[in-house]
Each structure stands twice: as C-alpha cells, then as structure tokens.
Image (cartoon, rainbow, N blue to C red):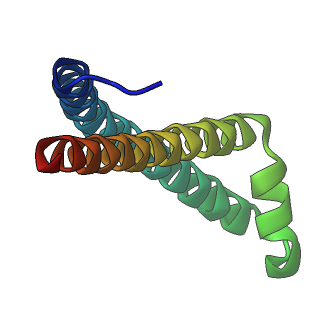
Amino acid sequence: MNKTGLDLDKELRTNVKLLASALESNKQRGKEYAQAERDYRVALRQLILLERDKGTPVTIINDICRGDEAVAQLRFNRDVAEQRYKSSQEAINVYKTFIRVAENEIQRERGR
C-alpha cells in the first residue's frame, strides 16, 4: 500500500516526537544506571573493608561480599538499570531508522 505525502509527513513527525521522548528517557535511565552502579560499588567496598577488619581471608572476601543479600540486591538493581538504559538506546536507534525510512520515502514521493 502506497502512502501519500501527508501520511509520510505525519509518520515522520510522529517518529521525530518519539525519538525526542526516547532521548529524554535515555538521559534519565542513564542517571539511574549510574546511581545504581555507584550504590552497588560503595556497598561492596564497605563490606569488603568490614570483612578485612574481621580477618576474613583475602581469597574469599569477594565471594562472601558479593553473596551478601543487600549487596546482591544492589547488583541486581544495577543490572536491571543497565538493561533499561540499553533498551532505551536501542529504541533511539529504531526511531532513527524509522525517520530515515520515512525521509527516503518522502524524497522518492517528491521525485515522482
């Protein structure tokens, strides 16, 4: 089914708006990811220092600390935030592709 010039223009405007929204979402998700990474690393460092003070053998400190329920939850939160950030980046790429396709179709339509 061929689209009219008006349909293509509307599709292009819609995708440009969606791209702008995805960019804003990506910015927020990037901040959330950075904060989750920070929270995880700080908690892990604190627990490692506590384990060192207790005299826990250095060879098992990382395993013990990463297995701590609170630290594991922070790592989980970090991983979820990372995936949300990556998915928003992918959405941006998809909208860019839709925009390029619409622009190409508009150029072909105008060339006729």
Q: Which residue is drawn at 12% across and 43% down?
A: 110
In the depicted view, which residue is nearer to us: 107 or 24? 107
Q: Residue at x 52, y 37 (%)?
A: 84
Q: Which residue is drawn at 50% across and 48% down?
A: 86
Locate residue 33, reporting x and y percent.
43, 44
Locate residue 111, reporting x and y percent.
14, 50
Q: Residue at x 87, y 71 (%)?
A: 60
Residue 15 lies in what quarter of the image? top left
Kindly give the residue lying farthest to the bottom in the view shown. Answer: 59
Answer yes or no: is residue 106 visible.
Answer: yes
* Left or right, residue 49 beside residue 51: left
In the depicted view, which residue is nearer to us: 79 or 94? 94
Residue 95, compared with residue 60, is above or below; it is above
* Left or right, residue 97 beside residue 37: left
In the depicted view, which residue is nearer to us: 34 or 9? 9
Residue 12 lies in what quarter of the image? top left
Locate residue 105, reporting x and y percent.
28, 44
